[in-house]
């Protein structure tokens, strides 16, 4: 009877862990950035439900919007690449750049501005560990 009870408890714990990891989001599939309309709903969803979101691997351009998720975990091996926002026609857009900047913490925002990371389309890299 004790052995059976331990087995049930172990199974319940395993199912709970599996369910919680299934609720966690990840940046996989979003690595190369893209249009805000693809990223903003993900940010809103995870900020509303409070589920964890993990940034892994490469995260460039609009992917960096995920930094505004409240319950975000940044893997040390993640690599962020920042640049100015564009208007969809290949021109620098102040409003798109501001949209990305507003997703960053004040410290990160200050750093990318002071170092010119958001002035042009050149990728500027920061590691997840930093």
Image (spheres, rainbow, N blue to C red):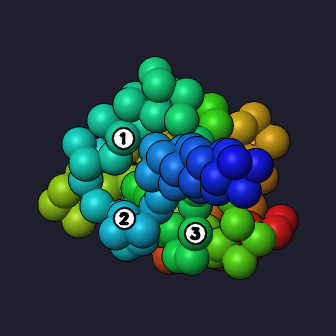
| Helix, strand or loop for disc 3 | loop
Circle 1/circle 2 CB separation < 8 Å: yes
Q: CA distance from mark 2 to mark 3?
A: 10 Å
Circle 3/circle 1 CB separation < 8 Å: no
Q: Which mark is residue 56?
A: 3
Relative depth, front residue between 118 and 82:
82
For this orientation, the residue located farthest to the top is 48
**Residue 56 appears at what percent x and percent y?**
58, 69
Q: CA distance from mark 1 to mark 2?
A: 11 Å
Q: Which mark is residue 30?
A: 2
Badge 1 is on which residue? Answer: 42
| Helix, strand or loop for disc 1 | helix
Relative depth, front residue between 65 and 112:
65
Residue appearing at x 82%, y 69% in the figure? 129
| Helix, strand or loop for disc 2 | loop
Q: Is residue 102 above or below residue 72?
A: above
Which mark sits nearer the N-terminus, 2 or 3? 2
For this orientation, the residue located farthest to the left is 89
Graded by Cα atoms within 10 Å as few (under 14), some (14 to 19) or many (20 or more), the crowding at tag 3 reads some
Graded by Cα atoms within 10 Å as few (under 14), some (14 to 19) or many (20 or more), the crowding at tag 2 reads some
The C terminus - image quarter:
bottom right
Relative depth, front residue between 57 and 87:
57
């Amino acid at each position: 009877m004790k052995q059976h009870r331990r087995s049930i408890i172990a199974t319940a714990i395993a199912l709970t862990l599996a369910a919680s990891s299934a609720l966690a989001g990840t940046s996989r599939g979003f690595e190369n950035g893209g249009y805000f309309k693809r990223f903003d709903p993900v940010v809103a969803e995870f900020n509303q439900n409070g589920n964890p979101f993990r940034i892994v691997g490469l995260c460039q351009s609009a992917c960096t919007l995920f930094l505004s998720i409240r319950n975000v975990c940044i893997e040390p091996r993640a690599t962020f690449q920042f640049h100015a926002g564009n208007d969809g026609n290949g021109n620098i857009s102040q409003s798109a750049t501001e949209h990305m900047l507003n997703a960053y913490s004040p410290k990160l925002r200050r750093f990318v501005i002071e170092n010119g990371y958001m002035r042009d389309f050149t990728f500027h890299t920061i590691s997840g560990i930093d």
